[in-house]
Image: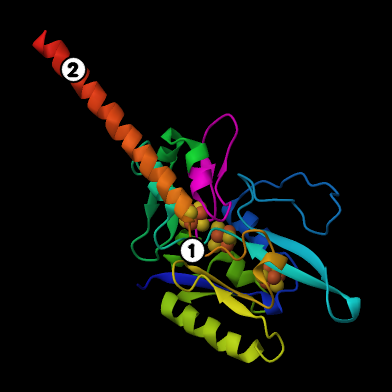
Amino acid sequence: MSGKAFFIDTTVCTACRGCQIACKQWNQLPATKTENWGSYQNPKDLSFFTWKVVRFQEHLGPENKPVWYFFPDQCRHCLEPPCKEAAEDDAPGGIIVDSETGAVLYTDKLKKANAKDVIEACPFNIPRVQKGTGYMSKCTMCYDRVHNGLEPACVKTCPTGAMNFGDRDKMAALAKKRLGEVKAKFPNAKVTGLEDLRVFYLLADEPSKYYQFAGVEKAPDVMDRKMALKKIGKSLSDLSREWQLLKKLAG
Ligand code: SF4
Ligand code: SF4
Ligand code: SF4
């Protein structure tokens, strides 16, 4: 499995939010109205116009001193995207995978899908829908830049080396190398996503300390059952339609 991948090294992320702003600038996404909600993190969440958000968490560390946990959140560009599976029946071609990079891309055809199904299928809480139009959006891997030999905007702008991008096998090797380097300082450190995703995070501590979905590596089985039931339901309704048609022709 080749294609491209991100390696996000949270151990050197300073939460400057340059990546968050660069994403807005390159993709010409309008600013989001923010408010003081008791955290330095802003905006509070991803949205139709915010495809990358740096999440902030604070926990007590050694000697009860506060420790920051920063998590630059974005689409993981799953190798087998559950969002695509969920949309396929209602909106064929609504979600495509770029054969060169592996980027998972939403098209305008996705408007025909049930947005709730697509949102619920994603184990990382990524897809967002625009109220009123039904269009859906998320990170595109900056495939337009990548196809022209450029790095994604968020990677290009990162001043600390936390954001990395390149061939998937090289990013996996870099992630493992960095894990080895930081283990002495952070014994709980781990890398997520190496098996199933195109975004690998190096986390210095338990994933749950960063964000609710930071440690999820793939879609839970319950989602597979839900999708299977949906497909069975659709097959039964197709059969019923065909039966009605046959009855009509026979009569
Ligand atoms: S630009 Fe780099 S250092 Fe700044 S918030 Fe993003 S990942 Fe962290
Ligand atoms: S992270 Fe979510 S939105 Fe992105 S490809 Fe995977 S399932 Fe789809
Ligand atoms: S790859 Fe591009 S679209 Fe995705 S988060 Fe980075 S800047 Fe935004």
Q: Is residue 131 magenta?
A: yes
Above or below: residue 139 compared with residue 92: below
Name the residue at 79% across, 47% down: 34
Above or below: residue 138 compared with residue 129: below
Where in the figure is residue 211, as x and y percent of width and height?
Answer: 68, 61
Residue carrying label 1: 145
CB within 8 Å, label 2 to label 1: no
Which quadrant does the N terminus fall into?
A: bottom left
Q: Nearer the viewer, residue 127 or 34?
A: 127
Disc 2 residue lies near ligand 2 with CB under 8 A:
no
Q: Nearer the viewer, residue 77 or 242?
A: 242
Residue carrying label 2: 245
Above or below: residue 2 compared with residue 76: below
Q: Is residue 68 magenta?
A: no
Residue type pointed to by label 1: Arg
Magenta-colored span: 118-141
Where in the figure is residue 146, as x and y percent of width and height?
Answer: 46, 66
Name the residue at 47% across, 75% down: 166
Q: Nearer the viewer, residue 251 or 153?
A: 251
Q: Nearer the viewer, residue 244 or 136?
A: 244
Disc 1 residue lies near ligand 3 with CB under 8 A:
yes
Name the residue at 84% across, 49% down: 37
Q: In which quadrant of the rendered view does residue 226 lie?
A: top left
| Identity of the residue furthest to the top in this view | 251
Where in the figure is residue 29, as x and y percent of width and height?
Answer: 62, 48
Number of residues whose C-alpha sits closer than 10 Å to that of mark 2, classed few (under 14), some (14–19) or many (20 or more): few
Residue type pointed to by label 2: Leu
Whether residue 117 is visible: yes
Seen in the image, is 238 located left or right of residue 249? right
> Could you give the CA–CA distance between mark 2 and mark 1, rounded to whole angstroms?
50 Å
